[in-house]
Every structure is written in structure tokens, then in C-alpha cells.
């Protein structure tokens, strides 16, 4: 599973000094009516209890220029908790959790359901707010390295 290219996403939750987040690569659309997403989080993640306690999270799909944010939220620089939010333009939408305003796309979600696999929590989020910056390119991850996704011919950033 390390070889297929995936979008790089930061899940974030909490408020003020109680903010927390992590970098994930398993986030996808679940339905459009109602708008829902699915995200997989390792059961050992320090952010998972905060997502559960807050009942809300944001899914922030990063742009090609935001690999430093991905590395920060992956814990590569050993910065944790609210200190991770020193990079990026963070605000909030409907639920009050942190939302990266300059992400490619950011979904502000309430946690609707959760399922556990042996190693991961499968989170189902109902989308309550969206930020869209479609003219940017998506940050992707494949085989241990970051890259970016080009737009396909005929696609536009409407």
C-alpha cells in the first residue's frame, strides 16, 4: 500500500490550546447526499482521543507547497499538540475545530460514526462546512516521498 499515490491530508480537532492533529493518507468521499467523508486513523494516534472527545474534526487536503505542514503533523520534527499549528493559515468554520484556510480543500465535519479494525479507527464525518481552493495542485505521497498531482487535460478549477 506504500506504492499507490494518495492525497496528503491533515485531520485536526480541538480549540485554542487544546488543538491536536495528524497527517493521514486514508481519507475519501463516502457520499454526496448527505455529504460525508471516511478517514482512517491509527488506534495509537495521540489525536484520536481528542477527535472522539470533540465529536468533530477537519480534513484538510494539502497543496504541493504544504509538505512542511504534512511533515509537522506526521511528527517528523517532534512537535506535538497545539504547537503543530504554528505553520499554516488556521481558522474555523461551523464546528469550531481548526481548518486550514489555504488547503486545496478543507472539510469541517462532525463525527457521525466510528468503527474499529484491528489497527485503525474508521471515522465517518458529516460535512458541515467546506473551503475550496481549486486552482492549486494537490500534495500526494507515494513510496516514502511527497509529490504533486497535475491537473488532467480538460479539468478546470471552477
Image (tube, rainbow, N blue to C red):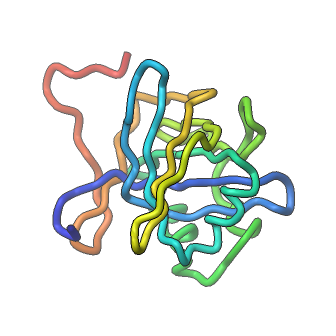
Q: Is 38 above or below relative to 115?
A: above
Q: Residue visible at 13% across and 26% down?
A: 153
Q: In the visual, does 3 lie left or right of 31?
A: left
Exactly how many numbered labels are in the figure? 0
Q: In the visual, does 45 lie left or right of 155?
A: right
- Please tell me in which quadrant of the rendered image residue 156 appears: top left
Toward the viewer: 120 or 103?
120
> Horizontal and vertical percent for residue 117?
40, 66
Q: Residue lying farthest top?
A: 158
Image quarter (top left, top right, bottom left or bottom right) of the C terminus: top left
Toward the viewer: 86 or 97?
97
> Horizontal and vertical percent for residue 124?
50, 44
Image quarter (top left, top right, bottom left or bottom right) of the N terminus: bottom left
Q: Is 103 above or below relative to 35?
A: below
Q: Residue visible at 55% across and 45% down?
A: 113
Q: Residue lying farthest right?
A: 17
> Horizontal and vertical percent for residue 14?
76, 54
> Horizontal and vertical percent for residue 141?
30, 62
Q: Residue visible at 56% across and 30% down?
A: 127
Q: In the visual, does 81 lie left or right of 4?
A: right
Q: Residue visible at 53% across and 46% down?
A: 60
Amino acid at each position: 500500500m506504500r506504492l499507490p499515490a494518495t492525497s496528503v491530508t491533515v485531520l485536526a480537532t480541538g480549540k485554542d490550546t487544546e488543538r491536536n492533529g495528524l497527517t493521514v493518507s486514508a481519507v475519501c468521499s463516502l457520499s454526496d447526499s448527505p455529504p460525508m467523508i471516511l478517514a482512517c486513523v491509527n488506534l495509537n494516534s495521540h489525536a484520536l482521543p481528542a477527535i472522539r472527545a470533540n465529536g468533530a474534526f477537519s480534513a484538510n487536503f494539502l497543496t504541493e507547497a504544504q509538505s512542511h505542514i504534512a511533515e509537522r503533523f506526521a511528527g517528523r520534527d517532534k512537535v506535538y499538540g497545539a504547537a503543530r499549528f504554528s505553520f499554516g493559515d488556521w481558522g474555523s468554520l461551523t464546528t469550531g475545530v481548526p481548518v486550514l484556510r489555504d488547503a486545496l480543500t478543507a472539510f469541517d465535519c462532525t463525527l457521525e460514526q466510528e468503527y474499529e479494525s484491528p489497527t485503525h479507527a474508521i471515522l465517518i464525518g458529516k460535512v458541515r462546512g467546506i473551503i475550496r481552493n481549486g486552482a492549486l495542485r494537490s500534495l500526494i505521497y507515494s513510496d516514502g516521498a511527497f509529490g504533486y498531482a497535475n491537473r488532467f487535460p480538460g479539468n478546470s478549477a471552477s
